[in-house]
Amino acid sequence: MDSVKQQIEVLREALEQHNHNYYVLNAPSISDREFDMMLKQLEQLERQYPEYDDPYSPTHRVGSDHNKGFEQVAHEHRMLSLGNTYSLAELDEFVGRCRESLPGEELTIVGEMKFDGTSISLLYENGRLVRAVTRGDGEKGDVVTDNIITIRSIPLQLKGEGWPAKFEIRGEIVLPWKDFERLNAERAFNEEPLFANPRNAAAGTLKLQNSAEVSRRGLDAYFYYMLGDELPAANHYDNMMAARDWGFKVSDAMTRLHSIEEVDRYVRYWDEARRDLPVATDGLVFKVDSLRQQLNLGFTAKSPRWAIAYKFQAERALTQLRYVSFEVGRTGVITPVANLEPVQLSGTVVKRASLHNADIIRQLDIHEGDMLYVEKGGEIIPKITGVDEDARVAGAAAVAFLTHCPACGTALVRIDGEAAHVCPNTYGCPPQITGRIEHFVGRRMMNIDGIGEETVEQLYSAGLIRDISDLYTLREADVAMLERMGEKSARRLVQGIEDSKAVPFERVVYAISIPFVGETSSKKIARACRDIDTLMSMTSEQLTEIDDIGPKIADSIVRFFAVEDNRRIVERLRQAGVCMSMPEADDSRRSDRLAGKTIVISGTFTRHSRDEYKELIELNGGKNSGSISKKTDFVLAGENMGPAKLEKATKLGVPVIDEDQFLQMIEIINN
Ligand code: IVH
């Protein structure tokens, strides 16, 4: 047994080292394939020997798709913000103020990047990550440790030596440009709202309930501040270099500066060079290096006197509005788009910018032919930020929002309290119809090979399909008659449609375009309902009992199935052989022994892993929860259950049971 334990430990250590080489040093030491094989080997061992499972094992970096609420804790040291400056003159004043308060002393300033993400505070004890907390309101924040563990560049176990027994390190969670772009492209494809910038995307991701989704999104983290009683050095810079040795990602841009001239040079250099960085930055931060001097300078109510931020200018261009076009999405939402005289901005040519909705057009007060300011400050998506009113041609009319759908002429409606105008002609408006079909065939939905936007348009114009269920009646001969479509492509398309019948039910739920039902909610709905008949018969109240399904989604589902056309389409899909239920296979393990019970898991177990227990709870009709409250029915406790949790359970009178008792409860063991 010991040798198994050893083998597990060797694998864990090696995998973490490879993670560090890849995610922190940017210098991969083995191929992805080799890495995956090692990870699989470790997973298998951990499954076989659950007694050696460890929440910090690299296998858990892929996250879990179970839900949890976030616990809130008070920060030991308040998380403050920084004062802002916008010019070298103001930086000069900052340095001057520091010098004045430290008469006759040498002053070293550390220059570093101001990463544009969301801040995080990590607590390490005996070299291990024990807790990750968001900034929150600066006084207290949310515990997001499970999500943070999925970030491969964050060390769970520190490397090297010399770390204090207990310390806090702060940094910025960022979403690198390439991951941000990939995420937004996916969201655009799924017609989900886009993130305006990597900062919003990082903050939103960190608060996700589903750590498997967090893991997939590709967050990263840079560290810039260490706190504690026994720090390795008496100055900020050396502390950060020590942090780098322990495995943290510390920006290479961090450097010591000794005069305002050096500060000036640093600003000028990074103002340009930041464009080549893989992550978004919105400025630079300058900090007094010596911790003793920092202590002397102290804090104002809001920010340290020993540090200041310098904000970069957002890039801006002025260009003429050619016209505003209106686009109709698959859900009927009308999006106004400013079509511009092409203009160069931060390395790309901008021709179009979304104006989002009628309110934004009115707020900006845009008139025909106006000269518009376009910005791309830390935002990849160009944004119209204002109008040059002096350049307005006398008598130019204000841009008016459409009253009727540009595609089908139906009068637009605006739902109370919502900003969007919608074309209500759901089943007769061509771009909505083709949009839904395009969505249906998409890679993450039915994944039908050989059909894209253009083919859908062709099939629709030729009258071969009016809705998604018509796809299943297409014959090779019909398809082959279309322009640019040979026999071979037609065969591929029809085969692709045939293959789609094997796509699991949860993706079918997503594919049929129920408004507001996205990829994640589809999964939850499908797993909870098991089949389409149950789903179609559920009331809004029943639907809101499903995890993460709120009244907006629930009402939308009920409204969707109330429409005769939708029920007919579903029926035709079923007749065609599209999968309308979850597989029966694991039904034998299901029961309702834990129906209505809310259960909290804590500690480590010997008979099954934590995730297996979570699954068992769900299979038996129970609900997993992350924190103990009055509503908790019992705590399933393993070894090393956290003392805080135990205390809370005792205080609230929540029973605590061990794994044998639990397994008896669900009748898996009978001794
Ligand atoms: S130091 C007490 N350094 O900017 C000083 N902050 O406006 C703590 N930030 O909340 C902050 N890069 O989220 C510091 N190199 C850097 C930073 C940085 C980004 C963020 C951080 C902070 C905000 C302050």
Image: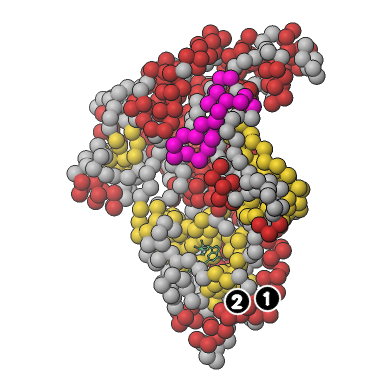
Q: Please say whether residue 532 is visible from this viewpoint.
A: yes
Looking at the picture, which amino acid does disc 2 mark?
Leu
Estimate how packed mark 2 is, as few (under 14), some (14 to 19) or many (20 or more) residues with alpha carbons within 10 Å.
many
Estimate how packed mark 1 is, as few (under 14), some (14 to 19) or many (20 or more) residues with alpha carbons within 10 Å.
some
At horizontal 60% and vertical 76% (from top left) the residue drawn is 91
- In the figure, 191 relative to 364: above or below? above
Say which quarter of the image contains residue 473. top right
Q: Which residue is mark 2?
A: 91
> Image quadrant for the C terminus?
top left
Q: Do callouts 2 and 1 mark residues in contact (Cβ within 8 Å)?
A: yes
Q: Report x, y in % for residue 657.
A: 25, 38
> Image quadrant for the N terminus?
top left
At horizontal 31% and vertical 47% (from top left) the residue drawn is 641
Note whether ligand 1 is within 8 Å of mark 2: no
Say which quarter of the image contains residue 628. top left
Q: Is residue 409 within the magenta segment?
A: yes
Q: Report x, y in % for residue 257.
A: 64, 77
Q: Please say whether residue 183 is visible from this viewpoint.
A: no
Helix or strand or loop: what does disc 1 sit on?
Answer: helix
Note whether ligand 1 is within 8 Å of mark 1: no
Task: Calculate the distance from the C-alpha at mark 2 to the C-alpha at mark 1.
Answer: 9 Å
Q: Which residue is mark 1?
A: 264
Q: Earlier in the sequence, mark 2 or mark 1?
A: 2
At horizontal 74% and vertical 7% (from top left) the residue drawn is 477
- In the figure, 392 relative to 654: above or below? below
Q: Which residues are magenta?
A: 407-428
